Image: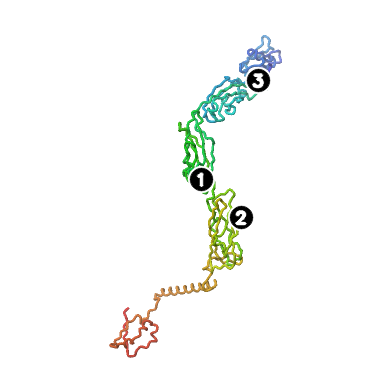
Amino acid sequence: LGTFVTKVTATDADDPVYGNSAKLVYSILEGQPYFSIEPHTAIIKTALPNMDREAKEEYFVVIQAKDMGGHMGGLSGTTTVTITLTDVNDNPPKFAQSLYHFSVMEDVALGEPIGRVKANDLDIGENAISSYDIIEGDGMDIFEITTDAQTQDGIIRVRKPLDFETKKSYTLKVEAANIHIDPRFISGGPFKDTATVKIVVEDADEPPVFSSPTYMLEVHENAAINSVIGQVMAHDPDVSSSPIRFSIDRHTDLERQFNINAEDGKITLATPLDRETNMWHNITIVATETRNHSQVSRVPVAIKVLDVNDNAPEFASEHEAFLCENGKPGQVIQIVSAVDKDDPKNGHYFLYSLLPEMVNNPNFTIKKNEDNTLSILAKHSGFSRQKQEVYLLPIIISDSGNPPMSSTSTLTIRVCGCSSDGIVQSCNVEAYVLPIGLSMGALIAILACIILLLVIVVLFVTLRRHKNEPLIIKDDEDVRENIIRYDDEGGGEEDTEAFDIATLQNPDGINGFLPRKDIKPDLQFMPR
């Protein structure tokens, strides 16, 4: 009551100095009893308390301005003022009905809406905004309610999976409350309302349910074929309780390492295992309802292969040791290490030994180190490549398994020439030992002379060819190219002395030959 609304102003063209010609008085012709106006100030105020926008929002008020102080004979003018009431939050939200019924299938997806409730508010704008909440009921942790910003509806959704076989219905108490409360009207509260929501769960044909979301099984790698590794279990949650059949998804077991009993879900071994090849096997078990093959569930099964001591230790790498000829007794020639494909719980511990026939080896001995390695030591000095270039030392490596496994690895030891500080220079015996005891410098000089001689021969042959001369000088007097005819008759055995056959075989000695004086041979040359 008496709240200022607005002020109007009227003007008069008469001279305000003379008389009351320009003295104006204001009055309301239409708009009462809701509003009033001050006659002289033209201020419009509310005339009634608790005006209700929800009953009437807009008013048309006709204002008259009259000169001559409002007396008779004065002139007047009118104007219309449109007054709109603004909203305040003076109304609570109100549900259209006190009880709502909804039904939902038990296999509904989480977050899926199952129904809407609506609380109406006569106010407008932010004064009509309400929030919804579940304040009571046996499904407070199963369902949730949110507000649709566009329609101001309360949307009920599923938070957790439903199970018809466990619980068939729920009752909720839902509250709608204004967000923006006007303190001036708080006494008119409460600005909220409640409604009851009943939700009925309907049965649906569900797939089988495994007793565990995952399975982890263990089996020793030496397990016998067809031995049982473990078992999976599943059941049909429906009231009908259909029997279940089990199978292995062979896409997860391409090598068909395992089998499963279709009736009881027992997993057995189909082929031998090897932990060193594959320590984990991850397969998928499928459970299918026999009455409805479309109802299928899957579960992952991880199978860990446990180790057994079935591998012998061996050298970590192919070792080849080098021994200096000028080495000292007790010198460490090589440190070797071993590896074992097995994986004992307490780690590896290796035992090293020589073959029984090599225990009294005169050249080498072994020493076990604290870090599970082995040192090879020379027993004496004075090794020589000329006497023996390579030594083979068989070593037995055993593990600490039960039963223990062992293998024999052979270490190759080469005798090498070393510098005074023990750096290996040469392990090739042919490059170092010469049969005539020549030094390396003498050998190099001999090789240089041979190469020089070969160069001279090549140059000589090249020059002869450029001159078109034969490489071998041909002499016309060479008796090997002549035929000698002797005209001598009846000499008998004396004829054999007419010439010396050695001369023909050795033409170089012809100058020293003295022919018989009684024989004069005729020489005839062969044409060329």
* Mark nearer the N terminus (3 vs 1): 3
Looking at the picture, which amino acid does disc 3 mark?
Gly
Q: Quadrant of the C terminus?
A: bottom left
Label 3: element kind:
loop
Which residue in the protein does label 1 denote?
Answer: 223
Which residue in the protein does label 2 denote?
Answer: 371
Query: From the viewer's perspective, is residue 409 above or below residue 519?
Result: above
Nearer-the-camera pick, 190 or 200: 200
In the figure, is residue 258 to the left or right of 2?
A: left
- Residue 266 visible in the current orientation: yes
Which residue in the protein does label 3 denote?
Answer: 189
Query: From the viewer's perspective, is residue 213 above or below residue 426?
Result: above
Residue 195 screen position, x and y as percent: 59, 21
- Are discs 3 and 1 less than 8 Å apart at CB? no
**Residue at 48% across, 31% down:** 242
Residue 499 screen position, x and y as percent: 34, 86
Label 3 packing within 10 angstroms: few (<14), some (14-19), many (20+): few
Of badges 2 and 3, nearer the viewer stands: 2
Looking at the picture, which amino acid does disc 2 mark?
Asp
Residue 48 screen position, x and y as percent: 66, 14
Residue furthest out toward the left? 489
